[in-house]
């Protein structure tokens, strides 16, 4: 596995490649969720590039940028064992300069839910993903469904800017007790870790109601809130794949999303129906 520390080094390494390129952008602290994306990329492409870059522009003032888990040695080993060909590990100064042109998230889809709670977050995500996609020029780029709104906005960016890449969305990977894997789970203390299970439980409650043909979103949200209490719930939303709020679950076109805080740790999870 080659390690590129600057965009120039990355370009140099990739210029000899003529086959398909799979790309998995990450912020490091890799877990099984990332690994599932990497493994799929390795299976489906001639070479796989993984980036590790804790992107400062997607963190709001007061968020966890400074304490975001950093485990480069472990991440390097995981990538190497998984068959990654190139690990891209740039520094902020090589990714950004002063007074840049920025990509903005769309006014409606980009400013609800995560975009409402974390204003500006998606501008930072889209800007860095645009840069990374341009640097790697992948055939396919892999993202998890856990960040459903991020995924939808990246797909929209690729469409709106006519970018030549296929975005592949893969299922959320969970711990054996149901908690969705996240690099931020390490922040949870013992009690918060137990309480966090209410999030996946609330989605199981929603699944059960839908299986009983109880499709009214108000009813589903009410029961989910009851399961989630007394967590600090930021939102429970039931939207279409295009992120338009729904009155009734439409099978094949619905995402149920939850965001809640456990102490100072924000967790998100969702269910695609
Ligand atoms: O999902 C993430 O880890 C990040 O938002 C991403 C896509 C790597 C951009 O920094």
Image (spheres, helix red, strand yellow):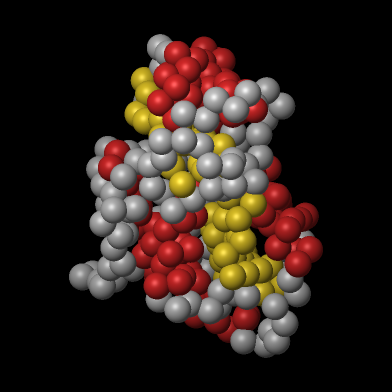
Residue 268: x %, y % from top left: 47, 35
Give the image location of residue 163, x and y in percent: 48, 77
Give the x, y percent position of residue 131.
42, 71
Q: Residue at x 47, y 17 (%)?
A: 223
- Front-most of residues 170 and 194: 170
The residue located at (60%, 36%) in the rendering is 181
Q: Nearer the viewer, residue 272 or 27?
A: 272
191 sits left or right of 168 in the view: left
For the image, the number of numbered tags is 0
Examine the image and state in which quarter residue 205 appears: top right
Q: Residue at x 40, y 12 (%)?
A: 230
- What is the quadrant of the N terminus in the image? bottom right
Q: Can you say whether 165 is above or below 257 in the image?
A: below
- Examine the rendered structure and indicate whether residue 28 appears above or below residue 163: above
Q: Residue at x 28, y 49 (%)?
A: 111
**Quarter that holds the C terminus:** top right
The image shows residue 149 at horizontal and vertical percentages of 44, 49
Query: Looking at the picture, does residue 214 appear above or below residue 86?
Result: above
Q: Is residue 34 left or right of residue 225?
A: right
Residue 183 visible within the image: no
Q: Is residue 144 visible?
A: yes
């Amino acid at each position: 596995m080659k390690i590129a520390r600057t965009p120039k080094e990355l370009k140099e390494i990739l210029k000899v490649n003529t086959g398909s390129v799979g790309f998995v952008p990450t912020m490091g602290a890799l877990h099984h969720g990332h690994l599932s994306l990497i493994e799929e990329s390795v299976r489906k492409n001639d070479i796989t590039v993984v980036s590790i870059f804790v992107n400062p522009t997607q963190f709001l003032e007061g968020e966890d940028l400074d304490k975001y888990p950093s485990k480069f040695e472990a991440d390097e080993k995981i990538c190497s064992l998984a068959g990654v060909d190139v690990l891209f590990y740039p520094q902020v100064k090589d990714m950004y300069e002063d007074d840049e042109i920025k990509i903005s998230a769309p006014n409606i889809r980009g400013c609800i839910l995560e975009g409402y709670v974390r204003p500006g977050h998606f501008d930072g995500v889209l800007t860095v993903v645009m840069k990374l996609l341009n640097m790697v020029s992948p055939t396919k780029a892999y993202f998890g469904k856990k960040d459903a709104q991020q995924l939808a906005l990246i797909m929209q960016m690729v469409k709106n800017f006519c970018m030549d890449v296929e975005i592949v969305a893969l299922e959320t990977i969970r711990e054996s007790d149901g908690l969705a894997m996240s690099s931020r789970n390490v922040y949870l203390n013992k009690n918060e870790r137990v309480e966090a299970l209410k999030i996946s439980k609330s989605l199981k409650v929603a699944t059960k109601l839908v299986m009983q043909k109880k499709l009214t979103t108000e009813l589903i949200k009410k029961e989910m809130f009851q399961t989630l209490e007394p967590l600090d719930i930021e939102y429970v939303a039931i939207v279409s794949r295009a992120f338009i709020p729904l009155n009734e679950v439409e099978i094949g076109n619905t995402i149920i999303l939850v965001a809640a805080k456990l102490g100072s740790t924000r967790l998100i999870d969702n269910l695609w129906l």
